[in-house]
Image (tube, rainbow, N blue to C red):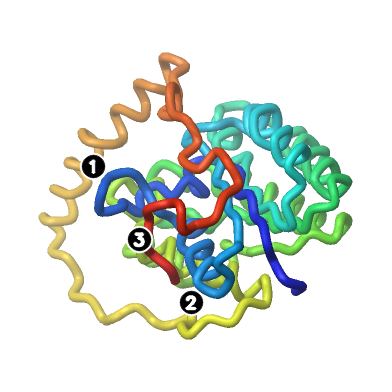
Amino acid sequence: MARLSSWVAIGDSFTEGLSDEAPGGGFIGWADRLAQTLAARDPDFQYANLAVRGKLLREIVEEQVTVVRQVKPDLVTMCGGGNDLIVPGSDVDQIAEEFETAVIALRQAGCEVVLFTGPDPREQPVVRRVRGKVAIYNGHLRAIADRHGAKLVDLWAMPVLVDPRAWSDDRLHFSAEGHRRIALRTAEVLGISVAEDWRDPWPPTVPRPWISSRRADLAWTRTHLLPWVRRQLRGESMGDGVLPKRPELEPISSQSDKAAV
């Protein structure tokens, strides 16, 4: 692609970077990792990350798409709708329609747009109950990308992400290695050369004994599942009170994280 001088990343926890923890606190994630790579090649490159965990698609549109239309970066990456899909009774077709409206607005602003499908959640205890909805939504996203000339990072088509090691302990967000591989795949979609390959096989692993697996499941239920259920019942979001970590377009050199792909 042509020289990329500015990029705004928008979305929810996936783009914010949960659970790719930064040494000094906070999160890195696939977007920050790729931004570091781009900044290393162009010191004038500017980057903003407006994504906030727990955001519904409507909130992403109102709070983030509006900003992008004002600043008009060269590139905008957008991932959203996943938090809407897990709401009981949510309408996949309606969510996709709202998403397409946002993509149209971004394209009209003159931005190159990159979209992301949802990953295959078949090994993830909570999210796999909406696997069918994710698959239908992904079909919509592929069609939206095709209709509006957007690039697409198809996470569902990345078999390396099915491995449990691609996911964090909460089984809802990607691990640091999962984020690294997604950054590599995104670079590939953008035509950016990188030294490593996201397809590299995972190292062999020894199967965990049954009793150890059950203990891990119980610990996960106490630590992650029950708090998640309580938030859902109360209508709370894990993003309540959380602000974007990189709200302004600025050079990476003025920001602290150092984790390129």
Quadrant in the picture for residue 153? bottom right
Mark 3 or mark 1, earlier in chain: 3
Crowd rating for badge 3 (residues with CA inside 10 Å; few <14, some 14–19, many 20+): many
Residue identified by numbered label 2:
198
Crowd rating for badge 2 (residues with CA inside 10 Å; few <14, some 14–19, many 20+): some
Instruction: Please name which of the two marks, 1 or 2, marks the residue nearer to the observer.
Output: 2
Crowd rating for badge 1 (residues with CA inside 10 Å; few <14, some 14–19, many 20+): some
Picture residue at 76% right of the left edge, 50% below the top = 140
Picture residue at 48% right of the left edge, 77% below the top = 198
Quadrant in the picture for residue 51? top right
Nearer-the-camera pick, 44 or 220 = 44
Q: Which mark is residue 176?
A: 3
Picture residue at 43% right of the left edge, 28% below the top = 242
Q: Is residue 187 left or right of residue 229?
A: right
Q: Which structural element holds mark 2? A: loop
Q: How many marks?
A: 3
Residue identified by numbered label 1:
220
Residue type of the residue flagged with mark 1: Trp
Q: Is residue 228 above or below residue 11?
A: above
Q: Is residue 61 left or right of residue 157?
A: right
**Residue 159: % across, % down:** 50, 71
